[in-house]
Image (spheres, grey):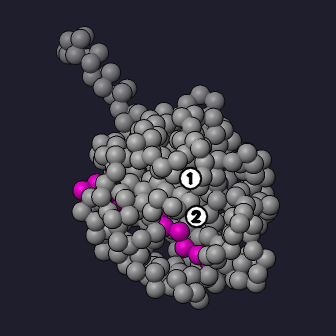
């Protein structure tokens, strides 16, 4: 018979195994295939990547770029989260263009474009129907019904081939809760996978927006695009500072860790974290959250990621 002290220790180990099993996993979100050949990226040994694909990718000048990225991801054995998005160049001066090229696709057009992509890359295991559905840069901004239309198409396509579908991929703006509630009312079935870009919480050192989504939706939440930003426009609060970005990246990991297991009052938990982005931008760019500078030299945030991601690959 085991001594009482040993029994107590074994029981503690068993009960303590839950949170470790529930830990979120880390990946990168990036648009350049050059990342895969960077020694610094290879040292991270990550297995997941998120990639944005214009819905009309096959009939634009970006087709070769998409093919190159997907081929490189396959060679490096990446599990790719593919997220469809608007035609490039449609959001200018805070307005979404009304040009013909920028019109939201019909369900039929969307299905045709999706099948062309999926037939080309049948190894993709997870799709997000549309990027940042609640943001002004997308044609879905004022229409949760349109976002649900694309989700419905992908949901039906799972009958042809098994893959996961992310219901809604949202940005942590003031309309997030209202938008998601509308989406839930309109969506078929019971969506259990959601995406969140929690830039505000990460860069202000808060948690309210992240918690709001976790209170609202059931299942799993993937932080599909987030990071400490090096620079945003001409903001006095977010001028160029790799050091500040590193501090915020540290909070990003702690925030994800706070909610990666079931908590009282919440309907979902965080199970994935995709860090955007790998390559930084020139100093005069309007947005920069790169882990490395434009020349590929690691910034301070890279070493934060290297430390935290080691056990969450």
Q: Position of residue 159 (x, y in %)?
A: 59, 72
Asked if the stretch drawn in magenta spans residue 119, the answer is no
Q: Is residue 143 left or right of residue 73?
A: right
The label shown at residue 232 is: 1
Front-lying residue, 287 or 120: 287
Q: Position of residue 98 (x, y in %)?
A: 79, 77
> Which one is earlier in the sequence, the residue at label 1 or at label 2?
2
Whether residue 257 is visible to the viewer of this picture, yes or no, is: no
Residue range in magenta is 43-55
Above or below — where is 210 with respect to 58? above
**Disc nearest the viewer among 1 and 2:** 1
> What element does badge 2 sit on?
strand
For disc 2, the neighbor class at 10 Å (few under 14, some 14 to 19, many from 20) is many
Q: Label 1 to label 2, Cα distance in Å?
A: 26 Å
Q: Position of residue 131 (x, y in %)?
A: 62, 63
Which residue occupies 57% across, 82% down? 57
Q: Is residue 169 left or right of residue 134?
A: left
> What element does badge 1 sit on?
strand
The label shown at residue 128 is: 2
Q: Position of residue 256 (x, y in %)?
A: 48, 40
Above or below — where is 31 with respect to 135? below
Which residue occupies 22% across, 16% down? 6
Q: Is residue 186 left or right of residue 27?
A: right
Front-lying residue, 207 or 12: 207
Which residue occupies 46% across, 69% down? 31
Which residue occupies 42% across, 60% down? 280
Above or below — where is 178 with respect to 33? above
Total of numbered circles in the picture?
A: 2
């Amino acid at each position: 018979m085991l001594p009482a002290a040993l029994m107590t220790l074994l029981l503690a180990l068993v009960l303590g195994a839950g949170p470790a099993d529930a830990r979120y996993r880390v990946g990168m979100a990036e648009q350049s295939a050059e990342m895969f050949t960077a020694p610094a990226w290879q040292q991270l040994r990550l297995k997941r990547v998120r990639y944005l694909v214009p819905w009309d990718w096959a009939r634009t000048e970006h087709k070769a770029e998409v093919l190159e990225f997907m081929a490189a991801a396959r060679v490096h054995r990446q599990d790719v989260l593919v997220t469809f998005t608007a035609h490039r160049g449609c959001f200018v001066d805070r307005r979404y263009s009304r040009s013909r090229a920028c019109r939201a696709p019909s369900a039929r057009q969307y299905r045709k474009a999706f099948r062309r992509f999926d037939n080309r890359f049948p190894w993709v295991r997870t799709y997000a129907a549309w990027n940042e559905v609640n943001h002004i840069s997308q044609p879905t901004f004022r229409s949760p019904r349109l976002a649900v239309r694309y989700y419905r198409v992908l949901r039906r396509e799972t009958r042809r081939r098994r893959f996961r579908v992310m219901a809604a991929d949202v940005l942590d703006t003031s309309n997030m809760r209202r938008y998601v509630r509308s989406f839930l009312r309109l969506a078929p079935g019971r969506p259990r996978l959601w995406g969140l870009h929690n830039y505000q919480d990460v860069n202000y050192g808060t948690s309210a927006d992240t918690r709001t989504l976790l209170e609202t939706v059931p299942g799993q939440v993937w932080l599909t695009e987030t990071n400490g930003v090096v620079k945003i426009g001409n903001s006095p609060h977010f001028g160029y500072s790799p050091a500040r970005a590193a501090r915020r990246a540290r909070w990003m990991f702690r925030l994800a860790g706070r909610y990666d297991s079931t908590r009282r009052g919440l309907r979902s938990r965080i199970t994935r974290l995709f860090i955007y982005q790998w390559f930084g931008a020139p100093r005069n760019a309007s947005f920069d959250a790169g882990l490395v500078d434009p020349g590929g030299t690691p910034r301070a945030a890279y070493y934060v990621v290297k430390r935290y991601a080691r056990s969450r690959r």
